[in-house]
Image: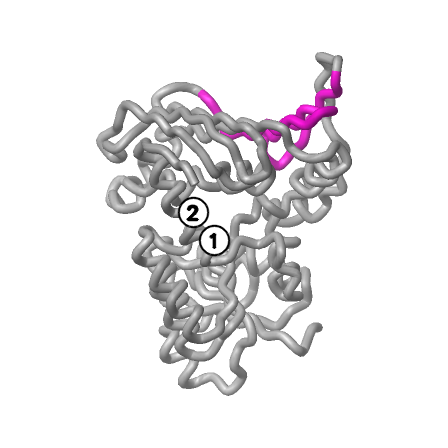
Amino acid sequence: MDTNKKVLLIGPGNMGLEYSKVLEGLDVSYDVLGRGKQSADHFYSVTGKSVIRKTVDEYFTQTSSKPTHAIIATDVLSLSKCVLDVMEYGVRNILIEKPAGLSALEISEVVKKAEETGSNVFVAYNRRFYAATERAREIIREDGGVSSFSFEFTEWPNTFLPMYEERQEILRSWFLCNSTHVVDLAFFLGGRPVTMAANVSGGLDWHPQSSIFAGTGVTDRNALFTYQANWEAPGRWGVEVLTKKHRLYFRPMEKLQIQELDSVKISMVELDDTDDVTYKPGLYKQTQAFLHARCEDMKTIVEQLSDMELYHIIETGGTINE
C-alpha cells in the first residue's frame, strides 16, 4: 500500500463507488465521507467499507490522520461548497467531479480560494484518459496534427427526465453538467476555439434557452471545427477527428475507429483498454495521474472557469473572436 498518500473520498453515491474500486486497485489508503444513511448503507453493502457519516467540519476536527488528497464526488449541487470546505482544512490536492459548480460565479469562488491557499484543483473529465483517447493522440502526433474535427452532443431527455423532475436547477444546466463531456474531449484533441459562431434554436420546458445547436470555428492549433446537436431528434454523442492521413471516429466514445486516406473502409482500432473494462472508462488512469502528480492532461479549475464563457456561447448562441 502507498503509505505516503491518504485520500478523502467525499460522496458515497454511484461515482463514489466507482472511485472506490479505483482506489482499491491502486492500493491507496482512503476514508469515505458522506451524510446520507441510505447511500452509506448501499456503499457498505457493495464494498464492505464503512462510510464516515459526518460533515466535512466534523471529520477534519476529529480525525488524527489528515488526508493528502481529496476526491469530491458529491451531488452536483454540493460540489463547489465541498471543495471550498476541504481547502479550508488544508488539503491542497483535489479532484472534483465535473462540472465543479453550476455557474461561473460558483467556479470563480473555487478559483479564488485555490489561488489564496496554493491548492491544485482538477476537474474530472475522465474521457481525456480513455485508452481510445490516448491512442488517438498518438495517431494525431504521428500524422502531424489535427486539420479539422466535428462533434455531436445530442441528449436523450426521456432517459434522464424522470430522475430529475424535482431538480429543475440541474436540468436547466444540463449542457454544463452532461454535454460538456463531449465538448471538452473535442477541444482537448483539436485545440481551444479562437473564433467561433454558435447558433441555437428551439427550447424545452426544462431547458427553455435552447434545444438545437450548430456552430463552426477555428482553434488555436489552426484546426477548423463544426458541431451540432438536436435534443428533440434522434442522435448520439460522437467526435470525429481528421488528419492528413486518417479520420478517427469516437462512436461510442470509449472506442476508436479509423479510416485510411483513399479508402471507405472503417476499422476498429485495437486498444490496450484493460483499465477501461475493469473500471469506469478513463477513471483509473485519471486517478492515477492525479495521485502521482502527472497532471499535464488534467483540466484545472482555472481552465474550467475560462471555458464557462465558451460553454455559455454554445448553449445560448453568439460568437468568439479572440
> Is residue 232 inside the magenta stretch?
no
Which residue is under mark 2?
A: 307
- Do labels 2 and 1 touch, CB within 8 Å? yes
Residue depicted at 60% across the width and 39% down the height:
189
How many neighbours does mark 2 have within 10 angstroms: few (below 14), some (14-19), or many (20 or more)?
Answer: some
For residue 21, side relative to residue 315 (left or right): right
Q: Is residue 50 visible?
A: no
Q: Nearer the viewer, residue 150 or 65?
A: 150
Q: Nearer the viewer, residue 111 or 221?
A: 221
Q: Amino acid at mark 2?
A: Asp
How many neighbours does mark 1 have within 10 angstroms: few (below 14), some (14-19), or many (20 or more)?
Answer: few
Quarter of the image for the C terminus: give it: top left
Question: Marks 2 and 1, Cα distance to the nearest angstrom?
Answer: 6 Å
Residue depicted at 40% across the width and 41% down the height:
310
Q: Amino acid at mark 1?
A: Glu
Q: Quadrant of residue 281?
A: top right
Looking at the picture, how far across and down is residue 250, in whole percent? 61, 30
Q: Which residues are magenta?
A: 235-261
